[in-house]
Structure formats: C-alpha cells, structure tokens
C-alpha cells in the first residue's frame, strides 16, 4: 500500500513539475503559431455561423471545435489555446502512465511518463496549440479502452484521433495491428468489427458534411495529400531522417 501511495505521489509530482516548466516556457511565447491561429479562427467561423474567422478545407475539425467553444464562452483566445494544448499534453502523460501501469508495473509507468514528458519534441509542442498532441491523447485513449475490452469506445476515440489530425491514421493502424497480433488473434471478427463501427460513427458525419460543402466525400483528404506534395520543401528530409531523429529526441527510445 505504501509503495502504491509513493508511486501515486510520483506521478502527481511529475505532473506538477511538467506544468510548472511548461508555464515558465510559455513566458517566451506570448503569441501563438500560424497553424494554431488558423485552428482558432476556424472555430470562430463555426460558432459564429461564418460571421467571424476563416475556413480552410484541409483542416481537421476536433481542435477548431474545442477552441471555438472557448471563444464562444468568452475565454481569452491566445491563453485558451495554450491551456487546451497543455491539458492535452498532461492527459497524454497520464494515459502513458495508466497504460504502462496496467500492463507492466508502476515503476515502468513512472519511467515511461518521465520519458514522454521530457522528450524534447513533446515538451516543445506541449503548449503550442497544434494538432499532434491532441491526436496522440485520443489515440492513447483508444488503446486504453481496447485493453479494457471496450472496442466500440476504443473505435470512437480512434475516430476522434483521426479527426484531430488526419495523418494520425499512421499511428492508429499500428496500434490495432500490434494489439491484434499479441492479444486478439482468436477474437478478431467480433471485437474489431465493434472498433470499426465506433470509428465510422465519428467519421460518417464529417463525410456527410463534405458532400454538403464540396460535393466530394473525400475532398479534404485529397487536398491534404496534395498540400504535402507542394508545400514545406524547406523541411524536406529523407525517410531515414525519422529513425535517426527519434533517437536524437530521446535516447531512451
């Protein structure tokens, strides 16, 4: 019991340290990045029926809906972007802890949480209002509920992760494949059909919206793919860049 209390205090202490350092880090970023501003303004567009803000066809809608709701309620726009981003970052750390604790040990859970929280790229993006960390949070939730044998709920959260960032599909698919290979080979059809229906339940309203707006169910995805081909060449790297960068970001990986 004392050991469990000690480990519980450890994750609380880690969370407080992470929040404190993140708040200090925010002092150096009094404005928000371009993409963060776009997501916030899409939210304004949605909650003002098009009277304020902007609309960009290729953007996923989860983060804009959250930020737009904050604007509608009356929160300071810039501060709310940072608070929401920090909340998703903290949530991701806690999800890593809970998943690791359940399937390994509390000691492993603490170490995993530390490595997550203070990986340089994770910490850097933890308060910038981008879509990466929110999509990670929802993907981790989908994994957690998959472990809890609640496949439909898992599918729902994987759908939300996808709607937070379209390219998170490249993380979602390996999560399910890994779980299938190691845990669920004998329960494939029943369990993963529920995952599929949960995922579809989130995606279908968006696809219907695409038909209504663009008369093309796949238009935002096609546009996003095209954008990746014609923009951002200054950041282009070869495929091997990612394997090297993962180690550079956190040698413990």
Image: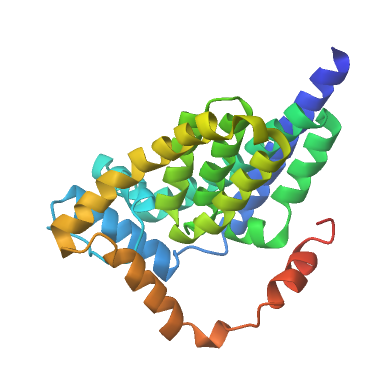
Residue displayed at 41% across by 35% down: 198
* 246, above or below 85, in the image: below
Placement of 245 over or under 186, stated as above or below: below
Residue 175 visible in image = yes
The residue at the far top in this view is: 1
Residue at x 69% of width, y 71% of height: 242
Q: Position of residue 122 (x, y in %)?
A: 65, 57
List x then y, in percent, for residue 80: 41, 48
On the question of residue 231 being in view, the answer is no
Nearest to the observer: residue 169 or residue 127? 169
Q: Quadrant of residue 113?
A: top right
Q: Quadrant of the N terminus?
A: top right
Q: Looking at this view, is 18 or 120 the one in front?
A: 120
Query: If the image is split into quadrants, where does the C terminus sit?
Result: bottom right
Count the marks: how many? 0
Q: Position of residue 157 (x, y in %)?
A: 47, 39
| Left or right side of 22 for 164 | left
Q: Is residue 128 left or right of residue 183?
A: left
Taking the spot 58% from the left edge, 32% from the top edge, the residue there is 146
Q: Quadrant of residue 213?
A: bottom left
């Amino acid at each position: 019991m004392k050991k469990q209390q000690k480990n519980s205090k450890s994750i609380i202490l880690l969370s407080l340290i992470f929040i404190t350092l993140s708040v200090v880090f925010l002092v150096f970023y009094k404005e928000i990045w371009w993409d963060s501003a776009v997501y916030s303004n899409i939210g304004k567009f949605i909650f003002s029926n098009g009277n304020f803000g902007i609309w960009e066809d290729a953007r996923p809608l989860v983060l804009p809906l959250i930020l737009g709701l904050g604007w509608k309620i009356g929160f300071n726009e810039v501060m709310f972007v940072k608070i929401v981003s920090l909340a998703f970052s903290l949530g991701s750390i806690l999800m890593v802890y809970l998943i690791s604790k359940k399937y390994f040990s509390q000691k492993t859970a603490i170490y995993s949480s530390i490595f997550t929280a203070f990986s340089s790229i994770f910490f850097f993006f933890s308060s910038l209002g981008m879509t990466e960390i929110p999509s990670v949070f929802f993907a981790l939730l989908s994994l957690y509920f998959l472990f809890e044998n609640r496949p439909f709920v898992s599918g729902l959260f994987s759908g939300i992760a996808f709607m937070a960032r379209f390219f998170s599909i490249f993380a979602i698919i390996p999560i399910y494949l890994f779980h299938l290979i190691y845990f669920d080979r004998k329960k494939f059809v029943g369990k993963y059909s529920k995952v599929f229906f949960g995922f579809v339940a989130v995606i279908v309203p968006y696809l219907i919206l695409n038909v209504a707006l663009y008369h093309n169910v796949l238009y935002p995805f096609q546009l996003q793919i095209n954008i990746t081909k014609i923009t951002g060449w200054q950041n282009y790297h070869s495929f091997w860049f990612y394997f090297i960068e993962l180690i550079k970001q956190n040698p413990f990986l």
